Amino acid sequence: MRVVAVMNYKGGVGKTTLTANLGAVAASRGLRVLLIDLDPQTNLTFSFFSIDDWHANLKDERTIKRWYDAELPGREISLADLIVTPKPVNEAIDHPGGHLDLISSHLGLIDIDLELAARLGGATTLDGSKRKFLDLHSCLRHALEDDRFSEYDLVLIDCAPNFGLVTKTAIVASEQILVPAKADYLSTLGLDYLVGNCAVLVQQFNDFVNHKRTADSHRPIDPAFLGVVFTMVQIYSQQVTLAQHTYIEEVRLNSQVPVLESKIRNSPRHFGDAGESGVPAMLRATGRDEVVKEFDQLADEVLGALDLLPGGHR
Ligand SMILES: Nc1ncnc2c1ncn2[C@@H]1O[C@H](COP(=O)(O)OP(=O)(O)O)[C@@H](O)[C@H]1O
Ligand SMILES: [Mg+2]
């Protein structure tokens, strides 16, 4: 099972659209995919379930908020109990082995960061507080080690645009980080800051793990940046506009994060009605659409990097 966090400090850059569509394309190639919605805005969840459906069937019992609420002392639910199978998308997946599941989010997740941070305090010894740090930051990582997750090939986590504790649990749980961005200054401004913050988290986590008395069941982490994928790119007569091309090349030269070859064009026709049908646009569109080819290429690039292409090691 490969775990990938999808994140960017900026909202509106296409994280959720990319997570939903990449997950759906991977499933339609025969992979078993789990999407985790870790953004309190709940957009990924609403890409697969109607708001009415979510209120009636998911809101109270089956959201990630409930799991973080119960996290640590006396935890009563297991993460795997929150898995749901959205129907329309699975009916649209045209591959016998392919499957897509979801763990849904909740607006109340926005308060969880503060509560988790409060739980970090309160230890009376230095060893105690290091142990708490490790336990709390690893909660998602440990939960994903449950046998019931071993049936998935790929887990994509749609993160909130911040670096709060919930996001950090996603980084700790992930082996790769994928960063969607628009080809403009504001969307890439936070890139190196994100790299820096991740490095600080990794170093602190691993320092505590290497400190024998607090490590217990913890292993070091080493999440890698899979790369930046530019989304909503402006195409003019079959080409990326000169301004955006220049900008992307500048990021490629100057950023610490690799830039993926694949790009997703701006296509309001495909992504304008996000979520209403419960089936991501890439499973509704015809194969001749350029943007379908772009998502296919992105899937090749990402799944290739994760060793999940047919003929790879897995
Ligand atoms: N390639 C695209 N072309 C046109 N519109 C897009 C594209 N990708 C995303 N959008 C639209 O842009 C808005 C923000 O996208 P979203 O995926 O929700 O971003 P984020 O999760 O980063 O906040 C949404 O309305 C979405 O439908
Ligand atoms: Mg989003």
Image (cartoon, helix red, strand yellow):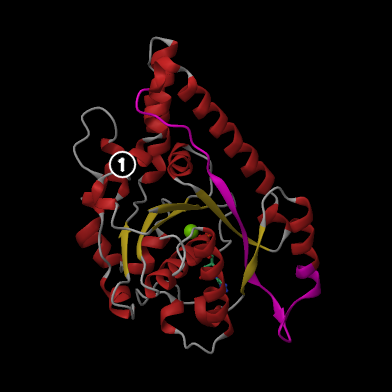
Q: Does 277 appear above or below 53?
A: below
The quadrant holding residue 278 is bottom left
Q: Does 149 appear above or below 165?
A: below
Residue 3 is at least partly visible in this image: yes
Residue 60 is at least partly visible in this image: no
The quadrant holding residue 156 is bottom left
Q: Left or right? Give the position of 23 relative to 243.
A: left
Q: Give the image location of residue 241, x and y in percent.
A: 76, 76
Q: Residue at x 34, y 51 (%)?
A: 106
Can residue 171 be found in the magenta stretch?
Answer: no
Observer-nearest residue: 304 or 240? 304
Q: Residue at x 81, y 74 (%)?
A: 242
Observer-nearest residue: 209 or 197? 209
| Magenta-highlighted residues | 216-245
Q: Secondary structure at mark 1?
A: helix
Quadrant for the C terminus, please. bottom left
Q: Give the image location of residue 50, x and y in percent.
A: 30, 69
- Going by the numbered disc 1, the residue's amino acid type is Ala
Count of marks placed on residues: 1
Q: Give the image location of residue 71, x and y in percent.
A: 29, 35
Can residue 227 be found in the magenta stretch?
Answer: yes
Seen from this angle, which residue lies furthest top? 125
Q: Does 45 appear above or below 161?
A: below
Q: Residue at x 45, y 68 (%)?
A: 311
Q: Give the image location of residue 86, x and y in percent.
A: 28, 68
Residue bearing mark 1: 143
- Packing grade of label 1 (10 A; few <14, some 14-19, many >=20) is some
Whether the residue carrying mark 1 lies under 8 Å from ligand 2 is answered with: no
Q: Left or right? Give the position of 301 relative to 166.
A: right
